[in-house]
Image (tube, grey):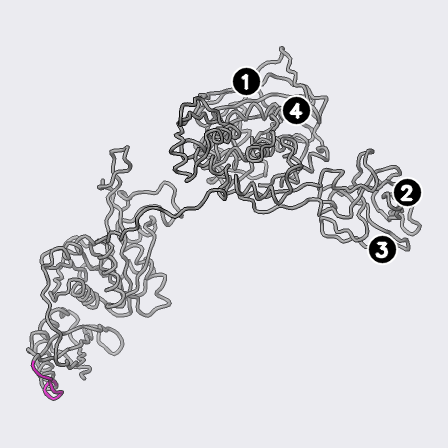
Amino acid sequence: MFISLNLLEDFIPLRKKYKAQNLALDLTMHTVEIEGYQNLADKYKQIVIGEVLEVKKHPQADRLNIAQVDVAKEKLSIVCGANNLEKGQKVAVALVGATLPIGLTITEAEIRGENSKGMICAEDELGLGDDHNGILVLDKKAKPGLSLAKHLGLDDIIIEIDNKSLSNRPDLWGHYGIAREIAAFSDIKLKDYEEIFKSEIKIGEDKNNLNIKVEDNNLCPYYSAIKVKNIKVSKSPLWLRNRLLASGIKPINNLVDISNYVMIELGQPLHIFDAKDIDKILVRKAKEAEKIELLDKTEKELNSNNLLITNGKKPLALAGIMGGLDSAVNDDTNEIIIESANFEAVNIRKSSLNLGLRTDASSRYEKSLDVNLCPLALKRVLDLMIQIIPDLEIDSQITTSSDIKNEIKVIDLDLKWLNKRIGTEVDKKRVIEILTSLGFKIESDEDEKLQVKVPSYRATKDVSIVEDLLEEVSRMIGYDNLEPASPSSVLEVPIISQNNKIIEQVKNILSKDVNLTEVHNYSFVGTKQLNKLGISYDNYLTLANPLTEHHTMLRQNLIVNILENVKVNQARFKDIEIFELGEVYLNVSGKLQQSNLQKSYLPHQEKRLAICLASDNEQLEKIKDILQTFVNKLLNVKKELSFQAFEFVPAWANKQKSVLVKYDFEDLGYIYTLNKKTAKDLGIKKETVISELNFNAIKNLLKKQDDKEYISLPKFPALERDLAFLVDKKVPYKDLKDDMSSFHKWIENVELFDVYQGENIDDASKSLAFHVKYRLQDRTLESKEVDEVQTELIKYLQEKYKAKIRDSK
């Protein structure tokens, strides 16, 4: 937001005390963050007022004139092509060396044989509007030689405020609110807003009220309007246009400019309707799919949450956001209705976001404006209109529909508590001075306690609790004036969370020991994903305000998103081996209360572990081995998992290749193999298996573990052999592993490290590769001895499983 020092000067004489740099610093330290400031006069250096002494035709060009112009210090000969150039005019002259706001640098030039020392400027060349029909003609009182910036009030300092620091301060969205803050921390007297009014507003007793009806007082607690006729739409006076431009608002016409000017003064948006087709005003919710064409010439389709201003038959404006094109003022407008209203902040915010419309009005309404601004703003608009359009006639009473309950907010402030929180002693008198300067009133004053009445302009969204008063006192004292002190609390060793310890342990095993990659997904899923998997989402928890159409519901498993990870990464990786540890959310009541005040509970949520393998070959045996390794490492024991068929296999999984995972008769979770049809629907081209385990079941295993008995490390080294062979693909991996492990007492461990199906292997077979570790506890084995046992093992596997040896070393 841009703040003009000239405009602030209407309310508070601050130039005597402040330079721009000092004011920017004080505002930052006490009120809002300042992004920067600039002097508008810098844009108009070497542009001065000149008086046209003589105009004669250019001898070599019919459309050019030669003007003699007095700029006080000298008389200049300037060639000019404007058709409105006349003797006696006061004009804006850019001297040689000047750079115009549009970027053009003026040089001395010869134009068709005549020397020209400068340029007489048009409005658009000075950045003061869009008019290029002729030169800018100034009023007759303009003094030759005077800086144009000074004459037009453009010798102004513009301060840019960071809008984020205004989010919770609806009272600061106008110059008067900023002036009130400056007055509080600088001890400069603030004028009452109505002191700047210059017109007498007379409304005849014979004037009738307007026909106004508000259907929903919650969405529109205050609506006031007045009718004015004998209006002439024209360009605004130069001072008004300049002040709007300085504040970042483009001038349009005198009516719109006046309403915008009051908005930047007071912070209250207004709207002006052409009254031609308005016999009544009805404020109502839009109908579903109702449409309105807006001032920006876009058509919006509305829903029943949007609020409309109508004439009872058709929409006139989208309340608090933008006016309609049908009721816009134009050059032929003779009668108008001026609206000053208050709208519910949340509704304006939601409508603005849903419709993709952010306007100066909506950005203010959504901050929760003070309803008491409405009548004040309406009077100010009338005051300015009478000044600028003196022939106008007020044609109705100020008509108001109001459902405001003037509830006064009072906060008890304990001064002992205040001083303890601030960390320094603040005198009671000083506290009262600070709060009073900010508009608060002290209702009662007893010992070390105050009852503080909050002004209406701070009570809508800002000051509501005693901590807010603490902030008010602290910032006015100045945070830089508070003495820093080290915290007095004793540092203690943090309590170790057993749950977090287990989570870290699980992740370390999977990433370091099993070499899986961890992924993190959103906790949301969408209907398209679930439909492709054939999962019903009738019982899923739906988000009220989803991030995207792909994230509309809370997930009930980790599988949906981890399959998406496979799809996205399959083109870049031959083998995908990933895991995720995350929450799922079920549509049943959980154990956590929504709040201390409510007895209802949040939905049940639980943590699960998903492991996914995707490759060109079948991965079922490999994921079983990974789960076995994971459990062994986690529990630090060697005990076999069991894998059993189960009945209710989801539609997206291969029933023959999906199993229940058990450990010591306790269900841990499932392994699913993605079936070919679903894989095609999802766009997945690899053989994919997913295991989803219940994290609570894993924790329960850890709790049940008895005290462990540690054995000493082996004294003698092991010898390892790799063994790879082909078997019928129906042969369970576990049967092979069990037989190999129990074949000879020297075999200490058997570990599967590869499963392959594909090129050079017939469709009915699969290749399994194992690490076989041999060891004796009382001596070192010799290679010859191990080779003999390995040969017997191979012979045994050939006989029992008709295994064909591929590699043995």
Residue toward you, 317 or 137: 137
- Tell me if mark 1 has few (under 14), some (14-19) or many (20+) residues whose alpha carbon lies within 10 angstroms of its own: some
Mark 1–mark 2 CB contact (< 8 Å): no
Measure the C-alpha gap from mark 2 to mark 4.
42 Å
Q: Earlier in the sequence, mark 1 or mark 4?
A: 4
The answer to which of 4 and 250 lies nearer the viewer is 4
- Residue 510 % position (x, y): 25, 64
Q: Residue furthest right?
A: 59
In the picture, the disc for residue 211 is 1
Q: Amino acid at mark 2?
A: Val
Which mark sits nearer the N-terminus, 1 or 2? 2
Q: Amino acid at mark 3?
A: Ala
Judging from the image, what secondary structure is the residue with disc 2 in?
strand
> Quick check: 376 left or right of 55?
left
Give the quadrant of residue 623.
Answer: bottom left
Based on the picture, tell me whether residue 781 belongs to the magenta stretch.
Answer: yes
> In the displayed structure, would residue 86 be above or below residue 694?
above
**What residue does disc 2 label?**
55
Whether pointer 3 and pointer 2 mark residues with C-beta atoms closer than 8 Å, the reply is: no
- Image coordinates for residue 745, horizontal then vertical, percent: 6, 77
The amino acid sitting under disc 4 is Phe
Q: Amino acid at mark 1?
A: Asn
Q: Is residue 288 at all visible to an observer of this figure?
A: no
Determine the CA span between mark 3 and mark 2. 19 Å
Distance in Å between CA atoms under marks 4 and 3: 49 Å
User: Which numbered marker is on residue 109?
Assistant: 3
Magenta part of the chain: 778-786
Which sits earlier in the primary sequence, circle 3 or circle 1?
3
Residue 750 falls in image quadrant: bottom left
Q: Position of residue 770 (x, y in %)?
A: 18, 76
Q: CA distance from mark 3 to mark 1?
A: 64 Å
